[in-house]
Image: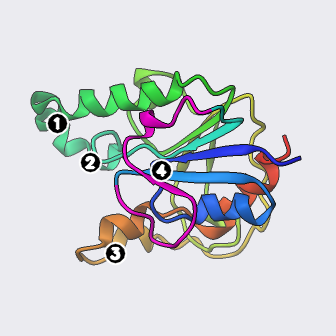
Amino acid sequence: MAVRVLIACEYSGRVRDAFIALGHDAMSCDLLPTDVPGPHYQGDVFDVINDDWDLMVAHPPCTHLAVSGARHFAKKRESGEQQAAIEFFMKLANAPIKRKAIENPICIMSTIWRKPNQIIQPWQYGHGETKSTCLWLEELPLLVPTDIVEGREDRIHKMPPSSDRWKLRSTTYPGIAKAMASQWGCS
């Protein structure tokens, strides 16, 4: 049975397209245009959040939340950027969608809100890299690893500076996107 899936804060289309490939009605939403053609709402996710979704997979921006940037937290608190990021995350967490997953790296939301239900790694889904990814789940099962592979490289955090480094670092790995679609699309 097809489900209506909102992929919040996704411009890559990777998770959206994984759900579509399995016959689901999925739409990505981001302030940025989509990287690949497909159903995408370019704008504020809260414009479409009440549109009768069965499931939401949200990828809120982590810039002001991730502990990898802890050295900048004082400045982010002072400017109000961190509080705004916390409030955005929590609006997604409290969205009127019964089944949802919120994805972020290791971040302050584990302290501010609650511990994640699960922390996954790309190497559990066919990619020989490390990138701890937290999942806060509601009415969804834990993701089961699909393809545990060798290699524990940390390429994602050691990328050289570039204009699209932020984009490359935040894109969901294809194996994780496929696991989300196959395991959550029918749960």
Q: How many marks?
A: 4
Q: Label 2: which residue?
A: 69
Q: Label 4: which residue?
A: 29
Residue 76: mark? 1
Which is closer to the viewer, label 3 or label 4?
Answer: 4
The percent position of residue 184, horizontal first and vertical second, equals 77, 45
Label 3 to label 2, Cα distance in Å? 16 Å
Which is closer to the viewer, label 4 or label 2?
Answer: 4
Depicted 187 relative to depicted 165: above or below: above
Label 4 to label 1, Cα distance in Å? 26 Å
Label 4 to label 2, Cα distance in Å? 25 Å
Mark with earlier residue (3, 4): 4
Secondary structure under the numbered disc 3 in the rendered image: loop
Mark with earlier residue (4, 2): 4
**Of the residues shown, which amino acid type is indicated by label 4?**
Cys
Q: Is residue 35 magenta?
A: yes
Q: Label 3: which residue?
A: 159
**Of the residues shown, which amino acid type is indicated by label 1?**
Lys
The percent position of residue 72, horizontal first and vertical second, equals 17, 43
The percent position of residue 52, horizontal first and vertical second, equals 65, 31
Mark with earlier residue (3, 2): 2
Task: Give the position of the C terminus as an image quadrant.
Answer: top right
Depicted 98 relative to depicted 173: above or below: above
Mark with earlier residue (3, 1): 1
